[in-house]
Each structure stands twice: as structure tokens, then as C-alpha cells.
Image (cartoon, rainbow, N blue to C red):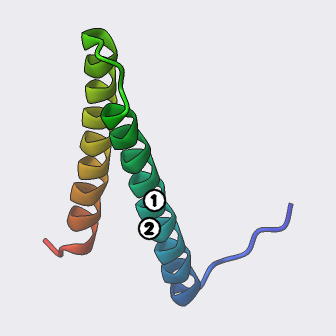
């Protein structure tokens, strides 16, 4: 296996790519879940499940944002 070191510039580019991917991923998941809520049949259990999915998506997105803020701030 060949090991190579990434330069800071390459690492920042990779980080930006991952960040953009995650932004798009969360946007798609939120849009899909919100559409499902809007088109949900009048069933309380289904609505509650979709609501929990949306809360989980938002919580995970928030955790990642907090981690990013912690990583970029200097102590």
C-alpha cells in the first residue's frame, strides 16, 4: 500500500467537498421528509414517524455544525 501525505491545500479542498456534499444531503433529506409530511395521509402514527425523522435529521445537522464551529475556533 502506498501512503501519501495530503498537503494543507488538498486537505482543505477535500473538507470543502465533504461539507458541500453534506449540505446537499441534508437539504435533500429535509425536502423529502417535508414533502412526505405534506402528503401524509390523515394518520397520526405516520405523521409522528415523519416528524421524528425530521427531528433526527435536524439534530444530526446541528451536531455537525457545532463540531465544525469547535474545529475552526481557536482555544
Is 6 located above or below residue 21 in the figure? below
Asked if marks 1 and 2 touch (Cβ < 8 Å), the reply is: yes
Question: On the rendered structure, is 42 left or right of 18?
Answer: left
Residue at the spot 26% in from the left edge and 28% down from the top edge: 51
Which quadrant holds the C terminus?
bottom left
> Within 10 Å of the Cα at label 1, are there few (<14), some (14-19), or many (20+) other Cα atoms?
some
In terms of secondary structure, where does tag 2 sit? helix
Residue at the spot 26% in from the left edge and 44% down from the top edge: 58
Q: Give how far apart the Cα atoms at labels 1 and 2 are.
A: 5 Å
Q: Nearer the viewer, residue 42 or 18?
A: 42
- Image disc number at residue 7: none
| Residue carrying label 2 | 19
Question: On the rendered structure, is 70 left or right of 53?
Answer: left
Question: How far from the left and from the top, in percent, is residue 68?
Answer: 29, 64
Question: On the rendered structure, is 11 left or right of 45?
Answer: right
Instruction: Specify the farthest residue to the right.
Output: 1
Instruction: Specify the farthest residue to the left.
Output: 75
In terms of secondary structure, where does tag 1 sit? helix
Q: Quadrant of residue 40?
A: top left
Which quadrant holds the N terminus?
bottom right
Question: How far from the left and from the top, in percent, is residue 67?
Answer: 27, 57
- Image disc number at residue 22: 1
Is 16 located above or below residue 29 in the figure? below
Residue at the spot 46% in from the left edge and 62% down from the top edge: 24
Question: On the rendered structure, is 8 left or right of 53?
Answer: right
> Within 10 Å of the Cα at label 2, are there few (<14), some (14-19), or many (20+) other Cα atoms?
some
Q: Nearer the viewer, residue 27 or 5?
A: 27
Q: Nearer the viewer, residue 63 or 23?
A: 23
Is 38 located above or below residue 40 in the figure? below
Residue at the spot 38% in from the left edge and 41% down from the top edge: 35
Amino acid at each position: 500500500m502506498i501512503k501519501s501525505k495530503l498537503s494543507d491545500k488538498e486537505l482543505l479542498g477535500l473538507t470543502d467537498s465533504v461539507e458541500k456534499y453534506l449540505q446537499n444531503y441534508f437539504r435533500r433529506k429535509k425536502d423529502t421528509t417535508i414533502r412526505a409530511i405534506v402528503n401524509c395521509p390523515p394518520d397520526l402514527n405516520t405523521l409522528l414517524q415523519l416528524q421524528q425523522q425530521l427531528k433526527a435529521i435536524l439534530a444530526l445537522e446541528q451536531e455537525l455544525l457545532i463540531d465544525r464551529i469547535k474545529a475552526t475556533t481557536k482555544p
